[in-house]
Structures are given as C-alpha cells and as structure tokens.
Image: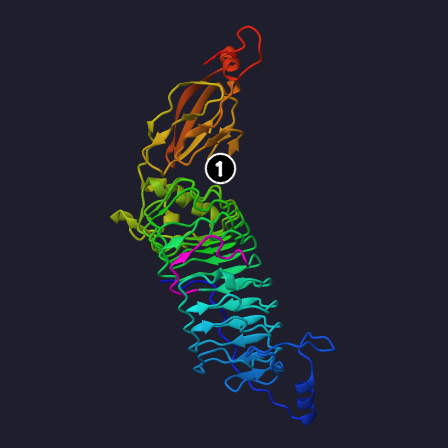
Amino acid sequence: MARARGSPCPPLPPGRMSWPHGALLFLWLFSPPLGAGGGGVAVTSAAGGGSPPATSCPAACSCSNQASRVICTRRDLAEVPASIPVNTRYLNLQENGIQVIRTDTFKHLRHLEILQLSKNLVRKIEVGAFNGLPSLNTLELFDNRLTTVPTQAFEYLSKLRELWLRNNPIESIPSYAFNRVPSLRRLDLGELKRLEYISEAAFEGLVNLRYLNLGMCNLKDIPNLTALVRLEELELSGNRLDLIRPGSFQGLTSLRKLWLMHAQVATIERNAFDDLKSLEELNLSHNNLMSLPHDLFTPLHRLERVHLNHNPWHCNCDVLWLSWWLKETVPSNTTCCARCHAPAGLKGRYIGELDQSHFTCYAPVIVEPPTDLNVTEGMAAELKCRTGTSMTSVNWLTPNGTLMTHGSYRVRISVLHDGTLNFTNVTVQDTGQYTCMVTNSAGNTTASATLNVSAVDPVAAGGTGGGGGGPGGGGGVG
C-alpha cells in the first residue's frame, strides 16, 4: 500500500559543539538569546517558579549551533526536560516515553520554530501546553496515543504552518477542530485507522491550507472539504471509497494534485471531477475501475498526468473515448497508464493503443426521454433525459441555441449530474423547445421536448397579494 505523502524529513544527526578557545565559550555563555534585545528579556523556565532562563544543554540531550538545535531522541524521557535553552529553534523529542504535555511546558522558548514530539506515548495535551511559542512553524505529533484532536492546545500558535497528527487513535474530528490555526499550510491526518466520524464543519477556518493528507483513514465517503478554498494537494489513498459522486470535490477549484490509489474505487459517476478546474495530476491506480464515464476529463483543461494502471479495465466501447484522450494528451507515451483486463482477446493491451476497429460500437440509448411540460411562471420545472448508463455525456440545447453542460449554467437553469435540465424559477421567456443530446464514442442520440410557460393570472395574483382597497380588491377573501 502506498505510503502517505508528506512524511517529515528524518531528524538531522545530533552533533556536539567544539570550542577551540575558552574566550569563545565565555562569549557564548553570556551572550543574549538569538533575536533578543541588548537589555535581555527575563523568561521563566519550563520548570516554573521564576527560575532563570536555561542556557546550558540538558544532560539528556545533545546541542549544537549555540544550543539553537536540541536533540533528545531515544533517551527514555517520561517528561519534557525543564532546562531547554531559551534560544532553541529546533527541538527533537522523538522516540521517548512522554505521555502528557503539560500547560506552559514550552513557554520560555519564544524562538522555537520546529517541535518534534512524534513516536512517544502522548495521550493528553493540556490546554495551554504550547503557550509562549509565537515563532512555532512546525509541530509534529504523529505516532502517539491521542484519541481526540487537541483543539484548544493550538491557541496562540499564530505562525504554525505544518501540523502532523498521523497515526494516532483519533476517533472523530469535530467541527472547527483547527480554526485556532488558520495559518496552517500542511495538515497530515493520515493513518487515523480508528476514525469513525468527520464533522461537516471539521475544516472550517483553514483558508490557507495547501496540503491535506487523509490517506488510510478508514473513509467510506469523501468528507466535506468546501472550506479549503486554497487546497492544492489532497491525499485520499488507502481508504474504502467505492463510489466517487458529483460534488465530492465541491469548492476545490485550486486543487492541483489528487491521489486516490488503493482506495477500492469501483465507480466514478459522470461529472464527479467537474469542480477540479486546476487539476494537473490525478492518480487512480490500484483500484477496481472497469470503465469511466464518457469525457470525464474534458472539463479538466490543465490535467497533464493521469495514472490508471492496475485496474481491471474492460476494454469495450466505453473506454474508446479514453483511448482517444490519452493519444491526444500524452501522445509521446500512450503505454504509460493502463492495460486491458478483459475481454480475453485484448487482455494486456494498452488502452492508449486501441482504436474503433477493435470494437463494434452503438450510439447511446435514451431510456427516459424528456416530455412536453406545461407550467406557470414562477414555478420550478425539470426536463428529464435518462440514459441506460453513466458512461455517456448529456448536454442540452436551449431554444436560443445555447449549449448547456453540467457545470455551466444560466440564471435559474442548470444541468444536474444525472442529465436533468433544472429550472428553479421559470419565466415566460423560457418557453420553447429543448433538445437533450446524449453522446458516447459511437455517436450521439437526441430527444426534444417543449416547455410551455403560462403567465401568472394578474387577477389571481392580486387576490393573493393583499392588494389595495376598492371594488374587488381582495380584502374580503377568507
């Protein structure tokens, strides 16, 4: 199974300082913290009680770069050492036995930028645990024992850009779980294997998020991600997403990369990717896909890389459009993406090498054509056009010659994902003939219906509107 992307770089190797001259050591010991003013700043140590700020390296750790890098990995620590130097910028506490992060543990480390607490036994993070960290950029908490998202502990981390919570036994993500850190750019929630619930408003407030990892999280549906208006990379691999529906990626107009490998995807419905206007790379490899809806990728004008290998593709007329698309999009390498699994005569052939001579294809069938409809102005209306398969594309031609597709709209009129032409509020000007056009690789089939819109009876309208007085003004009704 593919590993979740975005894994943090391994910690740099520990190193000890060497001081060839005693004078240099004297200057280092009595110099102010990095970034501090000449008069110095009084800071209470993590141990509390107003003790002087720590300047020497803790016995259980190794320090370098004038104690701005402190590494305390694999030291069997049960708690965070109280004497971390005040000018520390990088603190690595990975692979210890720390269980609780207490309030004000790091409050004297105002220069700290990277804090690594991964691979401990952390089960509780107290409110205020990260107080006093105005410079913190990266917080790593993966591979611990957290059962909830420590939302309140993130207060005041105004510069936090990266948060790693991967592989914790978190069971739910509540509403506004990360709204205290709107500065986040990268959020790793991969491998939350006990996750059972994600609130509709879980990601509200993350207006700057660029990368989200939800891989291997036991997901059966794609959660609501509409708040992530700047999201560019989304990892959903390793879940159980049997069906991808239209609207699953609503609002993700900035998304450039989408990974859906090993996600048990068997069906992708028509128009499922229409919201992904900026998508450049799509990985659907190692799934259960046999075919894709006709022209599924047509709205994705920036799409350059598609990975479709290791799917049981059934090579019939439904994949012919895909063969044409591959030849046009990646003409230099049509063997990059997928092989036929069936029928037997085509097994092992690359989809990008197929052409119409390999099949006997037929134009699509409209099983429920639109019918003439009489409505009154102001009502809602629908013209159906149902096909026997989602592998076709459905467009509509309006009376004035406008071609409407899913994702395009006029005021009050839109094409739904099932091909229905929907009117939210008809007017007399909508009257006319509408033509449904269903297309597949073999051709197209059309069916037309007339929409008749009657004007509202002004007398009836006046009677229900509580019009003015005078004879018959409607005031006596009821």
Q: Is residue 230 magenta?
A: no
Residue lying furthest top = 471
Residue 337 percent across, percent down from the top left: 40, 53
Question: Label 1: which residue?
Answer: 407
- Specify the principal SS of the magenta part: loop
Q: Is residue 174 magenta?
A: yes
In the image, residue 20 above or below residue 382: below
Question: In the figure, is residue 270 to the left or right of 341?
Answer: right
Magenta range is: 166-180
Task: Identify which residue, 275 or 289, lies in the foreground.
Answer: 275
| Number of numbered discs visible in the structure rendering | 1
Question: In the figure, is residue 39 to the left or right of 124?
Answer: right
In the image, residue 57 above or below residue 182: below
Question: In the figure, is residue 79 to the left or right of 109?
Answer: left
Task: Identify which residue, 340 or 140, lies in the foreground.
Answer: 140
Residue 13 percent across, percent down from the top left: 51, 80
In the image, residue 17 above or below residue 327: below
Looking at the rendering, in which quadrant would you find the N terminus? bottom left
Q: Quarter-wise, where is residue 447 in the image?
A: top left
Residue 16 percent across, percent down from the top left: 56, 86
Which secondary structure lies at badge 1? loop
Identify residue type, mark 1. Gly
Task: Identify which residue, 255 or 129, lies in the foreground.
Answer: 129
In the image, residue 162 above or below residue 82: above
